[in-house]
Image: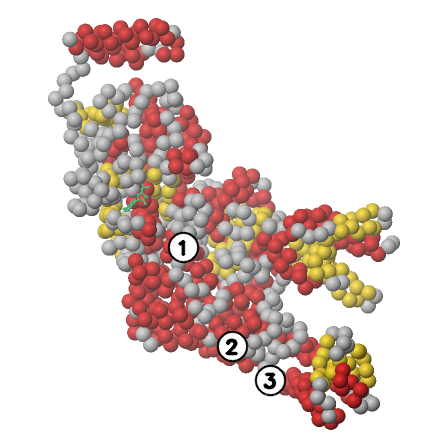
């Protein structure tokens, strides 16, 4: 066998051992990729491919220098590849290679990502009910277990979901965490629908991890090994098979990739999905939490309110925004901290200035634990740890802060331990250490006696050399003499040409240059050997001690994470306070009821760029559903999003853009926005609109907030009204969620008049009697009065008016009762029959009937015998005097209705129309 066969053969054999996508195999000073891997890597990273011939065949080969592997690995992994690395090591008979680690998107330690880097595992547990699950309706369906690890910060979180919507909740949860890599459990892998849902919502790499890692017994063992049995009990997941299986699978995968990252995972956090506000993917996008609908960061809620000074603080604030909470105690605690920081302006600025010097301790802890931190990183850890006492003093010395929850946050981190470790590191590492950790120069004198001896000898030898030139000059009376060192000649004495002949005999020439000669002497040669020996020894000893030190720091990952988290929290809270003060935001009152009351509220993002006209909002149990009408561009969407964002900010613990606000905590915020805007940009179809509606009708509860910005607009008018009508009734009667519904179907305002918990509001336009005085021509203000909206008469007969829309709604999974009801409403609209408003029972117990009159564009209400005419806009009937329709005209209308346009020849049509006109004219005259 030739050597070439050996290498390529060995590569292919190793490749067969791993299920990684690519293999980098060390061959001396290079890591090589062969065969298909070489092609892939060359393509992705723009490397040159050469050919390696072996046994008459030729294989593509691409390589990177050993020292440069990391950036290449990172680039490959960021493109979603999983890369195995085989290292070469010396053996008695030559050398051997084996796979030492696999680098994957979820286990990349040296990440450049600003956001969290989550690795997730998902299992389905068919028997399961989960104690920490969120739904009360137990029983049917499966439980899902979810675990998320961010090895760059050591964050580890698990939960389980059950109930009828578990699969949808699972997708939402995955979207929320946005993992870079997902390990689907054995029973998830075969669920194509679920996988497709996940793929649509995340860009994660899917990795098939060993099936037995998901087995309950094995997983439980893994989790206990990592965190201890008591922890598993105390966080309450001991009986939660789904959560434990997911957790175990993640841990075993991290271990298997062989990078030592397991050490950074020190804490297990089990969270119940009920602790958080459900925010599905669509809603996060619609509310533009972290990026705008156009995909820009600027103009998002996060970029608007982010004043953090550290990357860890920014990461935490972003996490808070995407995961608002429902736990009042925790929210009140954040609010109190924000309030204290808002009031203590000087201390706040001092705090922010201090935090500005903090590095990302959570990330540094992982780097120490995985052995990728260098000496500079350890100093950065020391510098950051040293901030804790400073921050603590700052908080303690300001009464307003000392009495706030900030004191507890700081106290939660062990000040003494942090100061000790910082002092130890400072005493060990020199001020400006080199980037390499293998060549010495890292440690201060006094750190280690044995090392000190070597350092002393080394420095002494260097000193001898440094002063050699002076000695030689004096001794031999030479002036143009210097001592230097380079790679080829080692140490040498260089003498200018003019004096080259005056050197003593012991000078042995080694090189002649244009203007000088280089010499050496026996003492110099001996010193050189000594220095080289000492350099090597010092490098080894320092590296050895550095690794010990780094390992000891890695063992304190828990401390580093606690301190890092505390500093991040202070930064995020100070950021909220800063924004509140600068923009005059108010602390909202939180309560567990349904009421949402906002006085003089503003939209947090729009107020930054526009002279915003504040407006009020009031909703409660008796005023649960608001139908918002108003002309295009009058501010309907803004008003509704503002309600959602104020609720969301309140549930982050932030102050809100309003004069005052009372916010009932919600369990979820659901939105769907106008089909037309989106349709125009090719991003939505009517099907998508209906799917979103379907999701809302299924998922929202009495404690949710629902924002509907147009429903049914993507289809024909009659269909659209029918669907919107049925959806409204369903939301009001079944779901009972707090809902804001903007619609251009003014017909629906009839529901506001009939259903007790539904009210009409409209965006007042300048000039209206009830618009705020003196607010100019561009007044936007929502008003609670029912009057003064213009009825647009958009109802039209016509060939496009088919029931296609309802059919799509059905396909999209809109609940059966809503679909049936839409058909029923549609039929009645077409037949011009009475539609009873469901849930709108009068005191007499009779159902209200509303008849939509095509001719007048009005609804007529009948209930309990007495008839009354209602204009859909709620304004007084425009023609109260109107008598019965003339029987002749009625006959014409009847015929018009019955005429089948498609079956009638055009000429005949013209004749018929003419005849009608004549009959009507004859009647008029
Ligand atoms: P609609 O949904 O009624 O079509 P939008 O909510 O999209 O209207 O608002 C139209 C424009 O008016 C947007 O540019 C928005 O920024 C601005 N706007 C909305 N509400 C206000 C307000 N209260 N004060 C000032 N500008 C507003």
Q: Residue at x 67, y 48 (%)?
A: 43
Would you call the spot at circle 2 few (<14 residues within 10 Å), some (14-19), or many (20 or more)? Answer: many
Question: Which badge, 1 or 2, comes first in the chain's sequence?
Answer: 1
Q: Residue 34 or 229: which is nearer the viewer?
A: 34
Identify the residue at the far bottom of this view: 475
Tag 3 residue? 445
**Residue 362, horizontal then vertical, whole percent:** 50, 65
Identify the residue at the far right of this view: 1
Identify the residue at the far front of this view: 498
Measured along the vertical axis of the image, is residue 81 above or below residue 709? Answer: below
Measured along the vertical axis of the image, is residue 691 above or below residue 702? Answer: above
Measured along the vertical axis of the image, is residue 838 above or below residue 86? Answer: above
**Residue 501, horizontal then vertical, whole percent:** 80, 87
> Disc 3, disc 2: CB below 8 Å?
no
Tag 1 residue? 303
Q: Residue at x 80, y 90 (%)?
A: 504
Image quadrant assignment for residue 694:
top left
**In this rendering, the label closer to the viewer, 3 or 2:** 3
Question: Which badge, 3 or 1, comes first in the chain's sequence?
Answer: 1
Label 3 and label 2: CA atoms lie apart by 18 Å
Q: Which structural element holds mark 2?
A: helix
**Residue 666, horizontal then vertical, whole percent:** 34, 49
The answer to whether residue 808 is left or right of residue 783 is: right
Q: Residue 316 or 639: which is nearer the viewer?
A: 639
Question: Which badge, 3 or 2, comes first in the chain's sequence?
Answer: 2
Tag 2 residue? 421
Would you call the spot at circle 1 few (<14 residues within 10 Å), some (14-19), or many (20 or more)? Answer: some
Q: Which structural element holds mark 3?
A: loop
Let me know if residue 334 appears in the view.
no
Label 3 and label 1: CA atoms lie apart by 47 Å
């Amino acid at each position: 066998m030739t050597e070439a066969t050996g290498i390529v053969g060995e590569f292919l054999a190793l490749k067969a051992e791993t299920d990684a996508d690519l293999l980098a195999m060390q061959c001396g000073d290079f890591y090589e990729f062969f065969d298909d891997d070489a092609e892939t890597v060359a393509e992705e990273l723009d490397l040159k491919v050469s050919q390696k011939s072996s046994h008459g065949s030729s294989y593509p080969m691409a390589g990177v220098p050993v020292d440069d592997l990391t950036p290449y690995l990172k680039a490959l992994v960021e493109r979603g590849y999983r890369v195995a690395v085989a290292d070469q090591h010396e053996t008695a008979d030559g050398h051997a290679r084996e796979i030492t680690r696999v680098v994957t998107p979820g286990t990349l330690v040296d990440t450049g990502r600003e956001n969290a880097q989550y690795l997730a595992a998902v299992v389905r547990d068919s028997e399961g009910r989960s104690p920490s699950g969120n739904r009360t309706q137990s029983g049917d369906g499966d439980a899902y277990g979810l675990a998320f690890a961010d090895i760059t910060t050591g964050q580890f979180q698990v939960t389980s979901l059950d109930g009828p919507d578990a699969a949808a909740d699972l997708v939402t949860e995955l979207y929320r965490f946005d993992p870079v890599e997902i390990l689907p459990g054995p029973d998830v892998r075969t669920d194509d629908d679920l996988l497709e849902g996940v793929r649509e919502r995340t860009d994660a790499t899917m990795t098939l991890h060993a099936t037995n890692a998901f087995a309950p017994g094995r997983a439980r063992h893994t989790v206990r090994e990592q965190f201890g049995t008591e922890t598993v009990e105390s966080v309450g997941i001991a009986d939660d098979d789904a959560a434990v299986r997911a957790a175990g699978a993640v841990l075993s995968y991290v271990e298997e990739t062989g990078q030592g990252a397991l050490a950074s995972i020190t804490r297990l956090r089990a969270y119940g999905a009920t602790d958080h506000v459900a925010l599905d993917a669509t809603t996060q996008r619609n509310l533009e939490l972290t990026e705008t609908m156009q995909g820009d960061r600027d103009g998002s809620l996060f970029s608007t309110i982010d004043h953090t000074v550290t990357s860890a603080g920014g990461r935490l604030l972003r996490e808070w925004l995407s995961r608002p909470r429902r736990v009042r105690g925790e929210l009140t605690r954040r609010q109190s901290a924000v309030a204290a920081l808002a009031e203590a302006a000087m201390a706040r600025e001092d705090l922010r200035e201090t935090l500005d010097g903090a590095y990302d301790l959570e990330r540094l802890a992982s780097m120490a634990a995985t052995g990728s931190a260098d000496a500079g990183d350890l100093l950065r850890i020391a510098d950051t740890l040293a901030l804790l006492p400073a921050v603590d003093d700052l908080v303690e010395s300001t009464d307003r802060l000392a009495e706030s929850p900030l004191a507890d946050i700081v106290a939660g981190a062990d000040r003494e331990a942090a100061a000790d470790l910082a002092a130890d590191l400072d005493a060990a590492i020199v001020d400006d250490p080199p980037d390499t950790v293998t060549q010495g120069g890292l440690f201060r004198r006094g750190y280690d006696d044995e090392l000190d001896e070597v350092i002393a000898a080394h420095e002494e030898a260097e000193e001898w050399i440094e002063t050699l030139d002076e000695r030689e000059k004096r001794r031999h009376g030479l002036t143009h003499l210097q001592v230097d060192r380079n790679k080829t000649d080692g140490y040498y004495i260089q003498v200018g040409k003019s004096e080259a002949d005056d050197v003593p005999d012991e000078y042995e020439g080694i090189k002649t240059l244009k203007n000088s000669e280089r010499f050496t002497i026996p003492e110099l040669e001996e010193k050189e050997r000594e220095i080289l020996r000492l350099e090597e020894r010092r490098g080894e000893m320092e590296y050895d001690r550095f690794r010990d030190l780094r390992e000891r720091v890695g063992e304190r990952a828990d401390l580093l994470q606690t301190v890092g988290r505390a500093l991040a929290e202070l930064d995020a809270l100070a950021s909220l306070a800063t924004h509140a003060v600068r923009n005059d935001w108010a602390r909202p009152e939180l309560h567990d009821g349904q009421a949402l009351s906002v006085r003089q509220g503003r939209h947090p993002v729009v107020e930054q760029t526009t002279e915003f006209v504040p407006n009020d909002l009031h909703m409660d149990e008796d005023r649960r559903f608001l139908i918002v009408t108003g002309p295009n561009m009058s501010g309907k969407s803004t008003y509704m999003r503002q309600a959602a964002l104020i609720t969301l900010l309140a549930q982050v613990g932030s102050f809100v853009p309003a004069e005052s606000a009372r916010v009932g905590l919600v369990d979820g915020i659901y939105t769907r926005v106008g089909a037309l805007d989106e349709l125009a940009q090719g991003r939505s179809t009517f099907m998508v609109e209906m799917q979103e509606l379907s999701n809302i009708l299924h998922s929202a509860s009495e404690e949710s907030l629902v924002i509907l910005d147009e429903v049914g607009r993507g289809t024909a008018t009659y269909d659209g009204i029918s669907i919107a009508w049925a959806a409204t009734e369903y939301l009001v009667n079944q779901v009972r969620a707090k809902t804001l519904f903007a619609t251009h179907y003014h017909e629906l305002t009839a529901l506001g008049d009939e259903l007790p918990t539904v009210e009409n509001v409209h965006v007042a336009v300048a000039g209206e009697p009830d618009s705020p005085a003196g607010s100019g021509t561009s007044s936007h203000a929502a008003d609670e009065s029912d009057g003064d909206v213009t009825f647009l008469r958009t109802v039209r007969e016509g060939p496009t008016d088919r029931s296609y829309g309802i059919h799509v709604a059905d396909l999209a999974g809109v609940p059966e009762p809503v679909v049936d009801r839409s058909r029923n409403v549609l039929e009645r609209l077409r037949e011009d029959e009475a539609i009873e408003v469901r849930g709108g029972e009068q005191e007499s117990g009779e159902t209200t009937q509303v008849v939509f009159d095509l001719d007048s564009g009005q609804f007529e209400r009948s209930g309990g015998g007495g008839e009354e005419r209602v204009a859909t806009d709620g304004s007084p009937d425009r023609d109260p005097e109107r008598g019965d329709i003339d029987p002749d005209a009625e006959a014409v209308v009847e015929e018009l209705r019955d005429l089948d346009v498609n079956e009638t020849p055009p000429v005949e049509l013209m004749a018929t129309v003419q005849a009608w006109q004549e009959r009507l004219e004859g009647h008029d005259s």
